[in-house]
Amino acid sequence: MAAPTSAAPESPSRLSGSLGVGSIVFMVVAAAAPLTVIAGTVPLGVGAGNGAAFPSTFLLCALVLLLFAVGFCAMSPHVPDAGAFFTYVRHGLGRPLGLGAAFLALATYAAVQAAVYGYVGAAVDELVTSYGGPEVPWWVYTLVLMGVVAVLGYRHIELSSRVLGVLLLAEIAIVLVLDAVVTVQGGAQGLSTAFLDPAQVSSGAVGIAVMFAIASFIGFEATAVFRDEAHDPQRTIPRATYTALVVIGLFYAVSSWAIVSAWGDEAAVAQAGASPGTFLVDTVNAWLGPFAGHLAAILLVTSLFAAILSFHNVAARYWYALGGHRALPAACGRTHAGHGSPHVASLAQSGLSFVLIVVFALAGLDPVAQVFAWMAGTATLGVLVLMSVTCLAVLVFFARSRVDRRAWNTRIAPALGLAGLLVCLWLTISNFPTLIGGSPALALAIAAVLALVALAGVVIALLQRRSSAGVPAPRTAPAEVDTRPDRTPAS
């Protein structure tokens, strides 16, 4: 099935849908790409980070993000439109910084989607050739999958949710089976306790470990992006946010601990350093047999596809929010009359992804060592800046508005979350050249691009404010009323 080629019916109305907690959590956890993290991030964290204690880093990062989520969710009822970072920063720090955050978020999600597009092209090629198939350029597979994502993104959000749900359950299941078998059998040398030892947790390259761990959570905050498509946003969004964080954090920590236990502490570090690309599949082969190893390789590809589709949906909704605020062409802020989807915004995101992949292919970049590494590093830096600014916006919003006087929710937890995020940001900046291949010049160039993108949003907002200055307000400016059923505020 292909996207319609004729002019699609359009509507300037808001997005529609009836997503529940489960559907949103599926999309957010799929964006985190659990199997991809276990197969790709865990070996790097164990081999180049803090060794066998790396599972504890997931728990520490999850704790910081839970503190961030407290203020994020407390502010949710007071931010009545979709847009996540954009709307939070706009309400807390003003429209110019809000638009700057929106442009930075769009660049961040475009970068992480491009990173996974590179990875999946290489993964599919490796899978096909391992079964005796022809070897073709990685970008051929990437462009084919891009077409599938474009069709799913164009249609109703609940179709994407169902696709992601099936893929997510399959990839989580095989890892949980591995976890259970290793735990029951007691590991190679007993179950690892390294994650409980503070000396081991703080050993090695802790900054590298934190970078890899925090990057594994990218996308969890996207729960707020689906506000207009949630069944009961004031209840659904907070529940989905907390659920996604807890599920992701526990899954990463337990699964990485099980894999370390499967090898033994010292052997796990050695194996992860020597063969990071096959660390998970080798573990599955040893503990579950060759058939499960082949299945894990296949599910890795579907995990990458699920991540791409989820990131696409998030990015499209930033296009949609910016179109609605006239920071991008107004057509991006329209919805499809039949699907209720941001179809123009979705097509715009598909177009941007297509351009990026074509540029990378023409430049002859390696899909993993360069496309994936550089773009994933860019996204990690961008999302940490966004979360830090959003946390500050939450603090300022509640201090100024006084609409919620709960000290823990509006002051203490957000302040602690901001402190934790700033530490993570400092560690990421300090180790950024390592994350994107060891080039300080490239690291500086990427940081400059992100800064310029954010600045462009600020400038557009200031120009819009200047152009509207002195224009008399309309005689009546009724507030937008959401007439959809089942959108009553939480009691």
Image (spheres, rainbow, N blue to C red):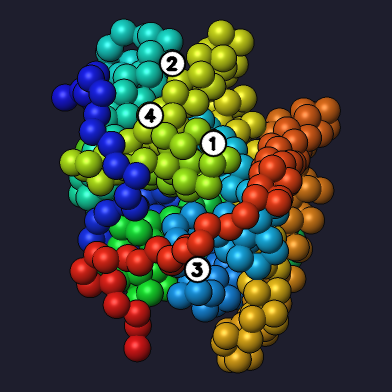
Q: Earlier in the sequence, mark 2 or mark 3?
A: 3
Q: Nearer the viewer, residue 191 or 421?
A: 421
Q: Residues within 10 Å of mark 2 (few under 14, many from 20)?
A: many
Please state which of the two labelled residues, at mark 4 or mark 1, is closer to the viewer: 1
Q: Is residue 455 visible?
A: yes
Q: CA gap, disc 3 to disc 1?
A: 21 Å
Per the image, the residue denoted by label 4 is: 347
Does residue 214 lie above or below 344 as drawn?
below
Q: At x 37% / y 9%, what residue is drawn?
A: 135
Q: Which amino acid type is shown beneath numbered disc 2?
A: Trp
- Dot 4 lies on which element? helix
Per the image, the residue denoted by label 3 is: 79
Horizontal and vertical percent position of residue 283: 40, 46
Q: Which amino acid type is shown beneath numbered disc 4?
A: Leu
Q: Which amino acid type is shown beneath numbered disc 3?
A: Val
The image quarter in which residue 310 lies: top left
Q: Earlier in the sequence, mark 4 or mark 2?
A: 2
Q: At x 42% / y 42%, what residue is drawn?
A: 333
Q: Nearer the viewer, residue 456 or 187?
A: 456
Q: At x 22% / y 41%, what residue is drawn?
A: 337
Q: Quadrant of the N terminus?
A: top left
Per the image, the residue denoted by label 2 is: 139
Q: Is residue 171 visible?
A: no
Q: CA gap, disc 4 to disc 1?
A: 14 Å
Horizontal and vertical percent position of residue 483: 27, 66
Per the image, the residue denoted by label 1 is: 328
Task: Count the labels in the image.
Answer: 4
Q: Earlier in the sequence, mark 4 or mark 1?
A: 1
Q: Nearer the viewer, residue 363 or 76?
A: 76
Q: CA gap, disc 1 to disc 2?
A: 29 Å
Q: CA gap, disc 2 to disc 3?
A: 40 Å
